[in-house]
Every structure is written in structure tokens, then in C-alpha cells.
Amino acid sequence: MTEAKKEKFIVPIGPQHPALKEPGNFEFTVDGEIVTDAAVRLGFVHRGIEKACENRNYTQDLYLLERVCGICSHVHATAFVLGVEKLAGVQAPPRAEAIRVLAAELERIHSHLLWFGVAAHEAGFDTLFMYTWRDREVVMDILETLSGSRVHYSVNILGGVKIDVDQKLSDLIKKDMDFLEERTEYYMKVVTTDDTFLGRTRGIGTLSKDRAKLLGAVGPTARASGVKRDIRVNAPYSGYKEFPVKMVIDQTGDLEARFVVRLKELYESYRLIREILEKIQPGEITTRIKRKIPEGEVISRVEAPRGELFYYIKSNGTEMPDRVKVRTPSLCNWGTITDVAVGHKLADMPMLLAGIDPCFSCNDRMVEIRSDSQPSQMMNWDGLRKYGIEYYR
Amino acid sequence: MSTDSENFYAQIVNKLKNWARINSPWAIHFNSGSCNGCDIEILATLTPRYDVERLGIKLQGSPRHADVLIATGPVTLQALDRLIRVYEQMPDPKYVIAVGSCALSGGVFDGCYSVIGDLNKVIPVDVYVPGCPPRPEAIIFGVVQLLDSLKKGKKPTKIVVSNDVPELIIEEKSNGNN
Ligand code: SF4
């Protein structure tokens, strides 16, 4: 595919590629097989959500912001709701806070399983992809029973939550958690002992602690490099004050560590969900909140499955926000790719990219300048993935 | 006489092609600015619970091998020419399935400055699957509708997905636009 001779080759990849299901354009400059430079071009799914927020009222914004990302829709709504509640000086009832955490952790499970499957697919491990996605349906079922939707659950409303858990549901969830825990046990075994898998992950794409800090990595990517960065622990919000979590840290910083960290986080989520279901107190799930939000500005940070999610909300005292700024974790982690890619084989790229769990829809609210010089050697993502798999055969 | 026999062979070949297409349509998926929700659901149709490959539907990478374009998202200006390019690269005859409220009308993103909204404004759409996101079952149903109309030998006209599965639509409404 890349008949690289002595001169440098640029291998553009994307934007249409079937594996990630999202458009994005990467450019790797290769010298033979070794990548010497990497660049990302984003912006294909820029929809202008931040601007649109200013033309809608707070309740409408909630549903709009949920659709920033289809994988982590709940955390977006949570971040927004927490910010607006802070502006309005309203505190959601404890039961609502607990349910928010419950939904957030369920979402984390679904997101991590989804990522695990996609990453396995990148490694050419399609059986594992099918396994994880089958198990993921268990979580999707829970979320659907809980909220009525598989993807955009709309759990949050301003001043509380919309859904409640009863005894029957909580028994069901507990049973499913047991099943998932057992499955995770198995995945952990695969990730840490399977030779084929280790060949693709161990010692690859190592990101040192200092570099991770410098590049502003967040979430599991940072935690796999030993950076203690988890908003749920560093600055507990919502129900995490009452139901603390343990931070999962790994010092190695390579791809394997990123797998291990995410899988260990799954255990933590199972534990937390069980704890919430045990200890949740009966009570109200909503409080009243005025339509007009008092003037002011606020920042709100939550831990999305991919890392720290940051919201800035400015209110001008009307029913609509003056400005909403979103900074999503995927964008922070992109920087690490361009750093880590250099010096690695082209065949490693799919795994490296999958390693940060990229999500284009959420970071593509940025406007990027389009360059119209399109280099001629195109390679689509599928091609690259196959290339990687063949290479390690 | 020669034209007659040519016609005869062309007919046979066409029939054969159509038969193959109906039995195993190859689909390509393009995200034109969706929030990912629809894409994940499309991906979910490949996985063990829904498993569209049992129906012969194969999702693959290159537009040049595809019969069906499954497009999601409100068509952002950035993705616009890519979408058209992918569509043009597909061999004739080609069919388009628009998945999700976004591709139907822009959905929640209606009125955003960088989206077009309706996919039909850009490329001709054959089947719409509503929902935000539609359930995997609904997506499969959409594909089946398309194949049905192919069997009847014409490019599908407007198919009302809702008549056959009222309960699906009720669900979609309750989580879509509240
Ligand atoms: S229809 Fe809904 S789920 Fe699908 S891309 Fe649009 S916002 Fe996302």
C-alpha cells in the first residue's frame, strides 16, 4: 500500500472510514515504515451547537447539549445542569443526585465496553468485538428500562432528574452487574495474558507522566500514565460526594495500561452502582427552578468516560444563556496522538488512535480552517487497519 | 435479431444483478455530522443481538463496492462535499437510507449555522428511518423496506415506515422531541 522508497510519504487517512464510524482526517508522514510526523484535521461534524445554545432556552439547551455526543450524552447534560443549578442557587435533592451518578456510571460502563470492542476490532480481534458488544447490550437494556431510550436517556432536568428506580429495577440491575463483572474478569484475562493482544499493546505508544501532564491528557489516557486526574475524586460533584470512587492509576503509560485502566474502572463502576442501589434514600427527585436564571457566570466540570468535561455558562438574566462553552475530553487527548505517533510503525496507528478512545462528534464544535491541498496517496481507515493486522500476522 | 438477443442477455444480467443485490446488499455508512448516537446504533446492528449479516447485509468500507448508502447526521457544511463525493463514487444503481431525525430534518440541530438539515436537499433519499436515534430494529426494518421495494423492481417511492410498526414510533416520539 505505501510503496515508500527513500523520499517521504504522506499518508492521509479518512475522512470516511468505516471503523471509527466518524469522520476525521489524519495525515501521517512516513519514512519507510516509521511515522515521522502526524497531524489531525477535525471539523467534519462541526454543527455549531454552542451558538445554537444562545438561541434556545435552558430547557431546550439541555436536550441540544445531550446530543453533543451520542456516547456520553448524560455527562453533557449533567455538566450543564450542575452549572445552571449553581447559577440559580438551587440544589437538587439527594436522591436525584444519586440517580445522576447511577446513570453516569451506567453510561461509563456502556462507553468503556463500546470502546473496548472497537479497540479489539482495530487489533483484528473481531471475536472480542462481538463479545463486548453483546455484553454491552445488557447495559443498554438497563438504560432503556430506566429511561426509555437507548442512547439519549434524558435523565436530567433542571433541578433534578426525570426517572426513578424502584426495587424491581434495582434487583435487575444488581443481577446484571454480577453478570458483567464476570465478563470483565474474562476480558481482563485476555488483555493481560493473550499473546496476540499483548504484541499489539505492550510497550506501544508509551506516554510518560511528564508528557501526559504537559500535553494536557485527561481521563483514562492520563491515568494510564500515572497522572492523578479524575474529577470524581479531585473535585467531587453531585452524588460523588456521598458515594466516593477510587481512582484507578497505572504507571506504565503504554497501550496495555490504557486497556487495564479502563477495565479496572469498570469494576469500580459496578461497585459504585451496587452501593448506590443499596444506600439510596427515598425522597423527592426534583426541586423547583425558575425559568429565568440570574445573571452570572459559572464553570462546571464533570468526569466523562473519556476524561474531564468542562462547561462554561454565562447567563444574562433571561431565559436563554448568553454563552455556553464546552471543552470535551477527546480534544485534549488528540494532542497526545501527534506526540506519541512519531517513531512508531504505521501499522500501530489504528491501535494508537483507538487507545485514546477518540470521539469526533464532541470535539468537532471547533471551527478549523480547511486546506485544499489534498495529497494524492489516499489510504482509508479500513486499509490502514487491515495493513496493521497483516503487519502483525 | 442481434439486438433482440442482446436485449435478452442484458435482461438476464440485470435480473441476476438485482437478485444478488436483494439477497446481499452491501452498505456503506457515512457520518455527515451526526452526534454518534445513530452511528453507534448502526454499528450495533452488526453485533450478535441484531446481526444484520444473517440477512446478507454487509457493512463495508469502500463506496465503490456499495449498493446502499446509510447516511446519518444533519449534513454539516464541512462534510457536504465528502458526502456528495462518496455518493458519486458509488456504482449505479444506488440507494440511500437516511437514518435518524437529523438526516430527516436537522433534528435538534435545526437552525444551526453550519448544517443543511435535510439530507434530501443534497442527495436523493430512498428510505427515511426516524428516531433520535432509531432503534437497531428500526434501522433493519428500513433496510428491509428498501429491499422489498427492490424486489418489486422499482426504485422505492415514499415508504411510510410508521404504518407497520406503530409501537416503534410511539417509543421514538417519547424520547425524541420532549
Ligand atoms: S438523530 Fe439523534 S442520535 Fe441520530 S445523529 Fe441526530 S441527534 Fe444523534
Image: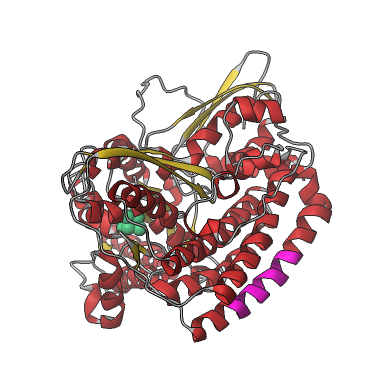
- In the image, what residue occupies the spot 57% across and 67% down? A136
Please tell me whether residue B9 belongs to the stretch shown in magenta.
Answer: no
Residue A171 % position (x, y): 57, 83
The reply, left or right, for residue A377 in relation to residue B34 is right
Q: Residue furthest bottom?
A: A168
Q: Quadrant of the N terminus of chain A?
A: top right
Query: Which is more toward the observer, B41 or A168?
Result: A168
Q: Magenta part of the protein: which range? A: A174-185
Residue A141 seen by the camera: yes
The x and y percentages for residue A389 are 69, 45
Q: Residue at x 42, y 53 (%)?
A: B28
Name the quadrant where ligand 1 sits: bottom left
A182 drawn magenta: yes
Of the 4 image quadrants, the one containing the C terminus of chain A is: top right
A148 horizontally vs A309: left or right:
left
- In the rendered view, would you say A218 is above or below B101? above
